[in-house]
């Protein structure tokens, strides 16, 4: 039998977090092997942000992350910030722009980010092994021995960067959670996040004519609120505000939707009624909402009546239908379309400064596999860069 090849650091998962960690460890002179079962590295980077990669957010801060331990992400986000990543992008000469709300996108293509990382990997001397699966792993001495489809490997530090469960057809697996459990770490239960929400068939049928309509809305779930776009679809609700709130929503919960959040609809309708009572309510509402949406709400609340025939009570009902819509989604579209996985390796078992498992020296978890999940808007890549960077200083 061939002797296993020896590395200082093996990183499993050549996504955003794994590549960043491998680059940093390689720059420290460590012999690094980066393994991925996919044929290409950074596939999620490639498809992200509609092909332009929303690679970070200027405002990234701990409050933008969900975790059972809200403070866990503070250290890594502070040590390698969004500005640090932006400096790398600028040094590489990649043109970028702020789209909205601090979200930075490449002007050109997300491939520029993948190419930057793979070039940095090469320069740091890290070996990238693609189309390689890990078939076994165990603790041996003060390191680890791995069996892979390309032969056996030993290492002092093993970094798990295999991401979450979203988009299984792109190679997402539960591998990282299995490793954690095998080594005695707890795993917070996982569920899809940043995902479209589905509605019950009766409501869906009623809303069917709105498929494709988008509106700037305010969505609330408890004390959490997002003011962003909402999109009616054939399956339910999507758009940034819906994806954001989906990470907070649990089965059975209600969410509240304001479809014209900056408008006092009641006053607007009253004023319009006083000025010209013969107007159809849909015409007036269409000044505040997309036409199809205005028509649907007016038809439902006012029938064929014009404004002069509507009492204040009816106007208030219309106001409620626009800005106080309470609904209970029936579920989500699941991992098939979710951008992230909520939950994951419990942070209690990890050192927040290094991402190393407290009770298993040499074992690290970084990126999405950890129970730290960002909002939509570049926050998840920033977590991958930050957690990968800190592990790379130590592994
Ligand atoms: P990631 O999933 O990127 O990488 C994990 C790697 O591990 C993969 O290469 C996989 O092949 C490999 N792997 C898994 N199991 C393995 C096994 N058993 N053996 C070997 N290899 C294995 N975020 C953001 O901030 N801005 C954005 O614009 C977007 N856009 C976006 C679009 C879409 C469609 C999705 C699905 C997601 C996003 N995201 C995003 C989220 C972002 O992509 C995600 O949070 C990061 O990619 C997580 O980085 P990781 O490196 O942790 O995992």
Image (tube, grey):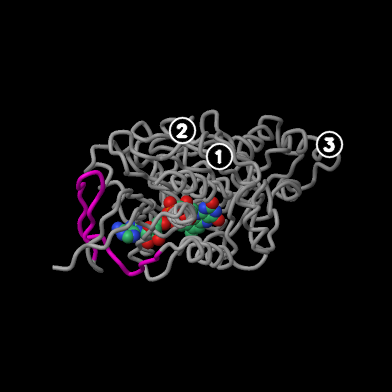
Other residues around mark 2 within 10 Å, as few (<14) / some (14–19) / many (≥20): many
Confirm or deny contact between disc 3 and disc 2 (CB under 8 A): no
The residue that appears at 49% across and 61% down in the rendered structure is 124
What label sits on residue 72 in the rendered view? 2
Q: Examine the image and state in which quarter residue 218 appears.
A: top right
**Mark 1 against mark 2, which lies toward the viewer?**
1
Other residues around mark 3 within 10 Å, as few (<14) / some (14–19) / many (≥20): few
Residue 332 drawn at (x, y percent): 41, 48
Q: Is residue 27 magenta?
A: no
- Which residue lies under the disc numbered 1? 79
What label sits on residue 368 in the rendered view? none
- Which residue lies under the disc numbered 3? 274
Residue 383 drawn at (x, y percent): 50, 45
Q: Which residues are magenta?
A: 127-148
State which tag comes first along the sequence, 3 or 1: 1
State which tag comes first along the sequence, 1 or 2: 2
Q: Is residue 129 magenta?
A: yes
């Amino acid at each position: 039998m061939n002797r296993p090849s020896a590395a200082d650091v093996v990183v499993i998962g050549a996504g955003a977090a794994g590549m960043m960690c491998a680059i940093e460890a390689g720059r420290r002179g460590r012999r690094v092997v980066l393994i991925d079962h996919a044929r290409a590295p950074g596939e999620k980077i490639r498809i992200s942000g509609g092909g332009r990669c929303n690679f970070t957010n200027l405002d990234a801060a701990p409050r933008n992350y969900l975790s059972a331990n809200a403070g866990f992400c503070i250290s890594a986000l502070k040590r390698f910030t969004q500005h640090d990543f932006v400096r790398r992008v600028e040094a590489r000469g990649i043109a970028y722009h702020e789209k909205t709300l601090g979200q930075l996108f490449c002007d050109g293509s997300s491939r520029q980010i993948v190419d930057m990382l793979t070039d940095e990997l090469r320069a740091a001397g890290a070996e990238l092994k693609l189309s390689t699966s890990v078939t076994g792993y165990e603790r041996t001495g003060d390191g680890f021995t791995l069996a892979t489809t390309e032969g056996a490997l030993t290492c002092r530090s093993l970094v798990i960067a295999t991401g979450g469960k979203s988009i299984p057809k792109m190679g997402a697996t539960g591998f990282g959670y299995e490793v954690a459990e095998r080594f005695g770490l707890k795993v917070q239960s996982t569920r899809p996040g940043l995902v479209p929400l589905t509605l019950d068939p009766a409501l869906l049928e009623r809303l069917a004519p709105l498929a494709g309509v988008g509106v700037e809305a305010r969505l609330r779930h408890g004390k959490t609120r997002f003011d962003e776009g909402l999109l009616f679809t054939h399956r339910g609700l999507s758009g940034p505000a819906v994806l954001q709130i989906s990470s907070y929503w649990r089965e059975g919960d209600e969410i509240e939707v304001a479809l014209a959040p900056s408008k006092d609809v009641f006053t607007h309708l009253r004023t319009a009624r006083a000025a010209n009572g013969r107007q159809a309510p849909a015409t007036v509402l269409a000044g505040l909402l997309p036409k199809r949406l205005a028509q649907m709400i007016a038809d439902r609340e006012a029938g064929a009546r014009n404004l002069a025939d509507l009492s204040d009570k009816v106007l208030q009902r219309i106001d409620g239908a626009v800005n106080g819509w309470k609904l209970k989604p029936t579920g989500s579209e699941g991992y098939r379309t979710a951008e992230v996985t909520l939950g994951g390796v419990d942070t209690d078992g990890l050192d927040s400064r290094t991402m190393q498992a407290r009770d298993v020296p040499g074992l690290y978890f970084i990126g999405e596999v950890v129970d730290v999940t960002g909002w939509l808007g570049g926050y998840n890549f920033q977590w991958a860069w930050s957690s990968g960077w800190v592990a790379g200083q130590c592994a």
